[in-house]
Amino acid sequence: MKRRLDCTTNHEVHADEKQRFKPDTNLERLNVFKHWLNENNVIWENVDIRPSILYTGFAVYSTSSQELPNIQIPTILLMSNQSTQISTTFVLPISDQLDQTDEHIDRETLILALFLLHECSKGVQSHWYPYIQLLPDTFTTTLFHKENYVENTSAFYLTETMRQSMTDVWNLVGSSTFQLEDFLWAYTTITSRSFKLAELGTALIPLADLANHVSFTDEANLYTTGINKETDRFVLKAKDKKIVDEEELCLRYNSDLANWQLLLYYGFAIDNNPSDSILLELKMDSNDTYEMEMKKMLLLNLSEDLSLDYELKIDENEPIINENLLATLRLIVLSIDELEQFNISNVNELLSSMVTVDNERRALNKLATFLNDFKEVSFTTTLEENLNRLKSNQLKDDERYSLIYLIGQKQIVDNALRWIDNALSQLE
């Protein structure tokens, strides 16, 4: 998707902006940004900004094997909702418009996205111009995919829902200055790059947002300490580990992010992601018989952690099919005679043991049917086709990350089906 918004709009240039110019190359853009960091007294010792070796765009790198990185960013450079409140040029949508958007988007995210667009339209007059001109023109999140690389998976439907929601929001608050695609860019900038701070809430933090994500805590060599109240700076510190010269400096964004979440909100996926999962929606018969109503009632009382929606996860510490999922399945396939054995007082027994061998077999076969139906509905290619396609050196990032996501999804399903086959064989 090509954005039509020009963040280098011509305006009358004020005296303190005469040194700014519109960069034409990535190197010029980077130099403008570095100069801005220095003139605003950002501390970035033993650190350099270079093109990322892992992802598209820029990243931060260590420049010393002897001295640890030291990054401290004055809060005046942070773009937050506090910035919107002290701005003399930004005008909020009317409260009625904001009220109507609440069902679609977090209000803090919406206001910050609109403020980003406002600052972008100011061109070189914006306090954040050197930062804005370094932001990517597009993203590899599914919202920006030109083709449907994720087939019919949950990521596809979540993307379509997100697109419709953001379209509804834009129809409520849109202006003649910007277009929907500009708003999608600003929204994605916020959701993919912002930090959550106790003092300021959601905030864009120049320089800090160039630190890429790693999936394991011990792989991260940076961590955030929030805002130092004495210095009024946001601080990134190096972990107590060996950091070598030329090493990329990374954070762990969040714990337990599956590839569908990474792809949807950040635009990448991780090979062999230890937190990967698939979203599985179990279904009960739609009839209104007494037996079905009893099952629904028992399900509600079985456990607050149980429902018809599950994530199948890759977790080395527990089986791919856990007891909560098995308990729900045992309940779903209860025969009339088996159903008579259970009431609210003893229904939690389903969590700890099988009802009968026959019930267990029906429960496992039911899950196998769910999973095979899931494969048929969700996937239009095979795992082997995805693996072979991933070997191509002609892939763009959006397709490559989508393939990594699809491969993980299919491997989880196949692992679950193998687990079921093994469990069924033990019932013989």
Image: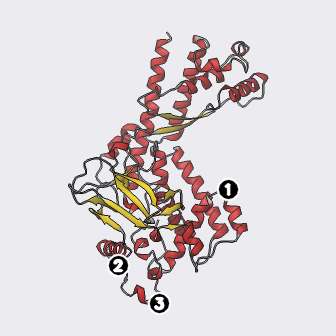
Q: Position of residue 419 (x, y in %)?
A: 45, 23
Closest to the observer: 26 or 180? 26
Which kind of residue does numbered mark 2 sit on? Pro
Q: Position of residue 227 (x, y in %)?
A: 46, 60
Where is mark 2, residue-wise? 23
The residue located at (48%, 38%) in the rendering is: 277
Q: The residue tagged with tag 3: helix, strand or loop? A: loop
Q: Quadrant of residue 236?
A: bottom left
Q: The residue tagged with tag 2: helix, strand or loop? A: loop
Which kind of residue does numbered mark 3 sit on? Glu
Where is mark 3, residue-wise? 12
- Label for residue 103? 1
Cα distance, mark 3 to mark 1?
40 Å
Q: Position of residue 363 (x, y in %)?
A: 58, 21
Which kind of residue does numbered mark 1 sit on? Glu
Looking at the image, residue 248 lies above or below residue 7: above
Q: Position of residue 404 (x, y in %)?
A: 39, 45
Q: How many marks?
A: 3
Q: Is residue 168 left or right of residue 234?
A: right
The residue located at (37%, 83%) in the rendering is: 20
Looking at the image, residue 360 lies above or below residue 212: above
